[in-house]
Amino acid sequence: MDFAHKTAHRIANESDIVVFEDLNVAGMQRFNGKMVADNIMGLISGLTRYKVELRGGIHHEIGRFERTTGVCSSCGQHHKLTLKDRYFTCTRCGLASDRDYSSAIAVERKGELDLMANGTVVRASKSPNTQQKLGVKTKVFALVKLPLGSEEIDKAAD
Ligand SMILES: [Zn+2]
């Protein structure tokens, strides 16, 4: 519980937009048994949603059946990986990738597309001046409409 809270707190404080993949925890539990029995991922996702929305940010979950594993982050080529394959080299462009890192990029991109498609955010044309100070590449989006449920949070804050 302590780990889940600390992890959710860190994620919620690092980003204004957080995208999670619906991991079908119930299905994973049936498949892997004890390994995910305590549903730590579901707990972290739920806590992160609460913390990020409290700060006025956006928590978005992409669909369970969205393909994110084995997708090349450079060219988008799909690769069939077994659970043992932690790294793969793209058969189209040759990029060597870490399985989890490339999945995270695929989740991020799908989340961005979802949020732009449903009109929640637009890509901002100009980056803020703080961009240089951060030292990391930050994508900038402008909020178009408040995410669902934010009215209740505003009311609760009054
Ligand atoms: Zn590639």
Image (cartoon, rainbow, N blue to C red):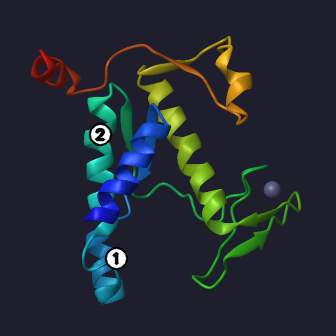
Question: Farthest right residue?
Answer: 94
Relative to 129, say whether 37 is above or below: below
The local secondary structure at tag 2 comes to: helix
Q: Is mark 2 within 8 Å of ligand 1?
A: no
Residue 64, horizontal then vertical, whole percent: 39, 57
Image quarter where ligand 1 lies: bottom right
Q: Which mark is residue 28?
A: 1
Tell me the kind of residue under disc 2.
Lys
Where's the N terminus, which quadrant?
bottom left
Question: What residue is disc 2 on?
Answer: 51
Distance of label 2 from label 1 (alpha carbons): 25 Å
Tell me the kind of residue under disc 1.
Met
Q: Nearer the viewer, residue 93 or 85?
A: 85
Question: Farthest bottom residue?
Answer: 33
Q: Nearer the viewer, residue 99 or 155?
A: 155
Sequence order check: which comes first, mark 2 or mark 1? 1
Where's the C terminus, which quadrant?
top left
